């Protein structure tokens, strides 16, 4: 991998990227935009009310956390630090119209990391 986050043109198949990230003991997989979310959803590794998304801003403002409500919606997770914007949000819009440099995903189905 040559980037902080997954790029299909550089990293190839998203499933291979997930396995490589896991085998290398890296932190959570990271992405930019909506397309990787859709790929993860189509792989069946994103689960509503379990999988979470963290928008990473990488500067003085706090990151934002969301839980996947369904394929089309992310819901704010209220935390003492790094809460998301309150309410239910359109997944595609939130992941594409953000100032965040990238986003990370946590609590994917374990099959995401198997060959």
Image (cartoon, helix red, strand yellow):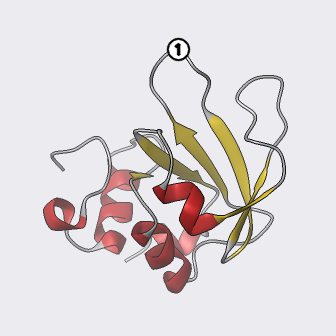
- Residue 75 location, quadrant: bottom right
Q: Position of residue 91 (x, y in %)?
A: 62, 65
Q: Quadrant of the C terminus?
A: bottom left
Horizontal relation, residue 93 to residue 3: left or right: right
Please name the residue shown 43% across and 73% down the image. 114
**Residue occupying image coordinates x 33% and y 70%:** 14
Which residue is drawn at the image coordinates 49% and 47% (left, top)? 103
Residue ID at (41%, 68%): 36
Residue 45's spot in the image, x, y percent? 57, 75
Check disc 1 and report its element: helix, strand or loop. Answer: loop
Question: Alpha-carbon neighbours of circle 1 within 10 Å: few (<14), some, or many (≥20)?
Answer: few
Q: Give the side of residue 42 with respect to residue 8, left or right.
A: right
Indicate whether 103 appears above or below 60. below
Q: Is residue 93 above or below residue 81?
A: below
Residue 107, x across and y down, in percent: 64, 57
Residue labelled with disc 1? 60
Location of residue 2 in the rendering, given as x and y in whole percent from the top left corner: 15, 46
Please count the marks in the image: 1
From this viewpoint, which residue is outermost toward the top? 60
Q: Is residue 49 above or below residue 2?
A: below
Residue 99 lies, with reference to residue 51, above or below; the image says above
């Amino acid at each position: 991998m040559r980037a902080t986050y997954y790029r299909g043109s550089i990293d190839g198949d998203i499933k291979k990227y997930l396995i490589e990230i896991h085998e290398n003991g890296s932190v959570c997989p990271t992405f930019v935009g909506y397309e990787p979310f859709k790929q993860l959803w189509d792989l069946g590794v994103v689960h509503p009310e379990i999988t979470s998304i963290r928008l990473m801003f990488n500067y003085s403002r706090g990151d934002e956390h969301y839980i996947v409500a369904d394929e089309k919606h992310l819901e704010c997770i209220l935390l003492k630090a790094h809460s998301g914007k309150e309410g239910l949000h359109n997944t595609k819009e939130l992941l594409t119209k953000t100032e965040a440099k990238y986003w990370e995903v946590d609590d994917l189905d374990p099959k995401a990391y198997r060959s």
